[in-house]
Image (spheres, rainbow, N blue to C red):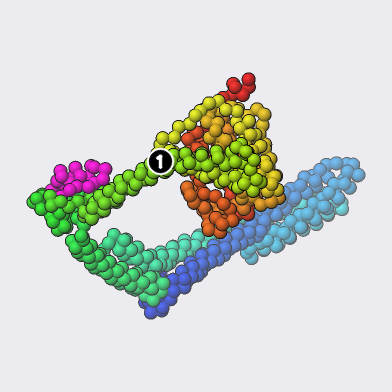
Amino acid sequence: MTLGLAISLRRMCKAADRRLRGVPATVRGKVLLAFCALAAITGFLGFSAVNSVTESGRLVVETYDKSLMSISYARLALSVFTQMQLAQAELRSTPDIDQREALNKHIAELSRSLTEDLGVARGRATSERAIIAANDTAYFVAAWTAARRRLFAGDDGQVASAELAQRANSVLDAFDNLVEVTAEDGFKDREQALASIEHNRRLNIGGTAMALFLGVVIAILLTQYMVRPIATASHAAKRIAEGELDVDITPTGDDEFGLLLKSMSVMRDNIRDMMEREIAARRSAQTRLVNAIENSAEAVILLDSEDRILLINSQVAAFFPDLASSFTVGAQLPDAIHDALTRSTGEICLVDGRWLRLTRSVADDGSFVIMGADITLLKVRETLLQAAKEEAETANRSKSQFLANMSHELRTPLNAIIGFAEVIREAMMGPVSVRYKDYAQDIFDSGQHLLNLVNDVLDLSKIEAGRFELDEDIVDVGQVISACTRLIHPRAGKANIDLVCETPVSLPFAHADERRLKQIILNLLSNAVKFTPAGGRVVVSACAQSTGEIRIAVGDTGIGMRSEDVPVALEPFRQLDGGMNRRYEGTGLGLPMVQRLVRLHGGELKIETAPGAGTTVSFTLPAERCVQEVASA
């Protein structure tokens, strides 16, 4: 029967499969359908199991409630009747009236209990025989009770006693018959219950087997509709990832898996087309690259990591005709080119007089690329530039020599002019009018200014020629700053400028050229006063830094300048613009001379400035020039 049911279910599944093939269901619909089917099977099994358990429980309860309880109450009634007999025997043997009365009451209560127990046994009976046996037992019990009452009422003792004993035997026989009948009914009900439970068990086993079969069928259908397309797609994707672009992809169905397979088929075709285009483009690029290398005006050599030639253009043979036979693919790089690459410049002179510059660069794959460029024109220009440089240096030396000679030539007449102007101004040779004294003062001031200018030019020329020497000694830097401040103070007062000196008492001494140090500070103070408007402030300060250096700074609240103008201000004979030249007199030698004198002392000049925010010029004397012991003494 079970085999036939399985065959029928299999036929039904095949029919359902044929119907489902024509239905364009989605994957979610198929999963939902399978879930509903499994839920229905599970619900059916659960319902069957619940019914089976309920039915089995009902049979067990009925067997206990009816047959077993009927037997139990029949035996209980028999026990009560036995107690009644014992009480009756005790009643007959006791002469005490009160005790006899108590025994009669006890027998009456036992009679009522016996009647109730027989009623329960009769009510729980499951067969007509059991009911008749219970009624007969009740009848014989009633007859025994009536005989007992007659014996208790005083009838003939022997006749009543014999009747009571006979009635008692009848009651016992009736009870035995009742117990036997109810026991037979109980065994019959038990057999029926066991048979029903076995039937339900078989139904559950059959239902479980059917559910397992249907689950297997559903799993097979899910495998056919879901797992198989997934496996097909996974296999196709793996082969495509491995580069097999000719893999066969056959779309099946109109659900998501069918669309996935169709999309993968389109993707495979697109990848194949893209790869074909990429290969064609790469070949085209390689062709263009080879053509570009071949038509290049430079020599190109491609080498592997072991200096074997991989690629070479015809320009290499044109540059090295005597090595043409050595430039073959797979051959080692010629020694002549290798030696040229070892030079710092990488330059090599060819046999025809041309110059070639070789450069070597490493590619990402470890190979090397050597490029050879014709630098003959560059060499010619380099030769011309070298010659021009030598001419310029010669001209510069001539200029410096000329300036030095002119300075010496100018000093002699200037000294005479200054001396005679001073004689006239002081009236050393006799009285002179006031007008001539004023003229003599103007001649003296102009001559002195021109002499200072000549001295600056001469000093600058010596510095540029490398022939300037410092006259070094131990210098009290604080006193030098104070002396310079006193010299500039009248000019600052005349211009209504506040000149402040902030120099500590414990400022160290230094090895320096005192006259040149004064020249540095005076130039800085003169510039600060010159470029600071009336009402401004000029501060000169000095301090010993933690590094051991001495820092001297001159700050003002003047016009300032842009940071890009600072290099211009440090060039000799330069000022910032024509308007400034007209407003502020000067030759443009102050800051350049200061910078060069500071560097001769081993220090460095620093300019901090901004338009309208003033300027702070500072310089340092190195730590090795400081003399702490003299300062402490």
Mark 1: secondary structure: helix
Q: Position of residue 609 (x, y in %)?
A: 58, 49
Q: Position of residue 56 (x, y in %)?
A: 57, 60
Q: Nearer the viewer, residue 49 or 348?
A: 348
Q: Nearer the viewer, residue 319 or 553?
A: 553
Can you name the residue that lies furthest to the right here? 98
Instruction: Work out whether residue 13 can be spotted.
Output: no
Q: Residue at x 70, y 54 (%)?
A: 73
Where residue 228 sits, quadrant-wise, is bottom left
Horizontally, is 217 left or right of 540 in the view?
A: left
Number of dots carrying numbers: 1
Can you name the residue that lies furthest to the front here? 430
Determine whether 267 is above or below 595 in the image: below
Horizontally, is 510 left or right of 538 in the view?
A: left
Q: Nearer the viewer, residue 408 or 597?
A: 408
- Number of residues whose C-alpha sits closer than 10 Å to that of mark 1, classed few (under 14), some (14–19) or many (20 or more): few
Tell me the quarter of the image containing the N terminus: bottom left
Q: Which residue is mark 1?
A: 405
The magenta stretch is 329-350
Determine whether 8 is above or below 363 in the image: below
Q: Position of residue 338 (x, y in %)?
A: 19, 44
Q: Residue at x 25, y 49 (%)?
A: 383
Q: Residue at x 19, y 42 (%)?
A: 339
Let me know if residue 336 is in the magenta part.
yes
Instruction: Work out whether residue 87 can be spotted.
Output: yes
Let me know if residue 251 is in the magenta part.
no
Horizontally, is 25 left or right of 264 in the view?
A: right
Q: Position of residue 526 (x, y in %)?
A: 60, 44
